[in-house]
Structure formats: structure tokens, C-alpha cells
Amino acid sequence: MRTLTLQPITEAAFAPFGHLLRVPAVGLPRLDLIEDMQNLRPSARLRLSLSSIAATQLPVTIEQMERHVASSQAFLPLACEGYLVVVAPHGLEGKPDLEGLRAFSVPGDCCINYRADTWHRPFTALHGPARFAVLTFVAGAPEDDQFVPLPEPVRIVA
């Protein structure tokens, strides 16, 4: 089993996979996500999902990853102490490349927006339960959500 150490997220480290978004402080201009939201299918519509999940304790073992081939996906914490983001570049046959796998700890006041076709682990709350909103473009097609098993389990540690 492969082991990966959790790292604090930074804009630079996450840039190949998407955008790290921080809500502006009071008095600063709002943050608009126009160019960052990707919809690569004219037939797709924006889906807003609201979810609540229990916290997960580290270490975490992951055995699969997901992607949204034609859509970005934004996670907007509504009530969250922190969460885990695991991403991977494309490897052979377009599957996740375990050599490039990254695990990030994200503060609960930060949002993320995965680029279209980015391999990632589903949302995982750390330190306590979380409520969040998710924005994804969907068309009712198989490429809306694709899940693949990893060739070997990966253990994420603090």
C-alpha cells in the first residue's frame, strides 16, 4: 500500500488541478467565478447540490477516484472546520497517475474549484461534520461522473 502525507493547500500547489478560492474580507470586492466555471457541453445544466457529511479521521485509505470529464466542480463549505482534497494528474489510458497524487488539507473557510476532467476523491470532512454546496454542470450522461478503482490502495496520513 502506498502512503501519502497530507500537506496544507496553497494556490500554487493546487493550480494544476483547479482554483483555491477565498471569500473576500468585508469591504473588499466580491469574487466572481465566470471563467473558472467550465461547461464543455452545451446541453449540460448547472446543478447546485447541498450536502451534510460526517467527519472522517486520518489516516484515510482511498481505493477509487472520480472525475467530471466535461465540467468543473466547485465545493463551497457552508459550515466546515476543514477538509481533505486528494487529486491526481492523468496517467496511462487517462486514469489517475499515482506518482503525481497529492493530498491537501483545506481550511473550512476556503472553497475549491476542480478543473474539468480532474481526478479527485469525493469530499471528505476532517475535524468535524461539514455542510457544503457543490456546483457541477450535468447532462444526464455517463461522463457527468466517472469513478475508477486505483491500481493499489493509497493511505493518507497527517
Image (cartoon, helix red, strand yellow):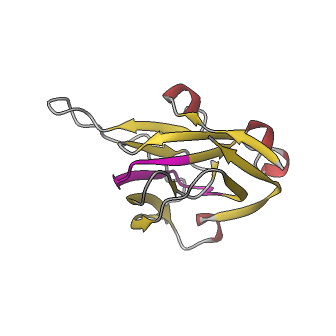
Stretch in magenta:
66-84
Would residue 155 appear left or right of 27 to someone viewing this image? Answer: right
| 43, above or below 9, in the image | below
Q: Is residue 106 magenta?
A: no
Residue 71 percent across, percent down from the top left: 53, 54
Q: Position of residue 59 (x, y in %)?
A: 65, 50
Which residue is the extreme one toward the bottom? 140
Q: Quadrant of residue 142?
A: bottom right
> Which residue: 55% across, 74% down?
140
* 106 w.r.t. 66: above or below: above
Relative to residue 156, is residue 27 drawn left or right? left
Image spot of residue 58 (x, y percent):
61, 50
Residue at 58% x, 65% y is: 144
Quadrant where the C terminus sits is top right
Residue 43 against residue 153 in the figure, above or below: below
Q: Position of residue 114 (x, y in %)?
A: 53, 46
Q: How many numbered callouts?
A: 0
Is residue 99 in view from this perspective? yes
**Residue at point 42%, 60% (across, down):** 129
87 or 3, nearer to the observer: 3
User: Is any part of residue 97 visible from this angle?
Assistant: no
Q: Nearer the viewer, residue 74 or 53?
A: 53
Q: Residue most toward the top?
A: 12
Magenta segment main secondary structure = strand
Who is closer to the viewer here, 46 or 147?
147
67 in the magenta segment: yes
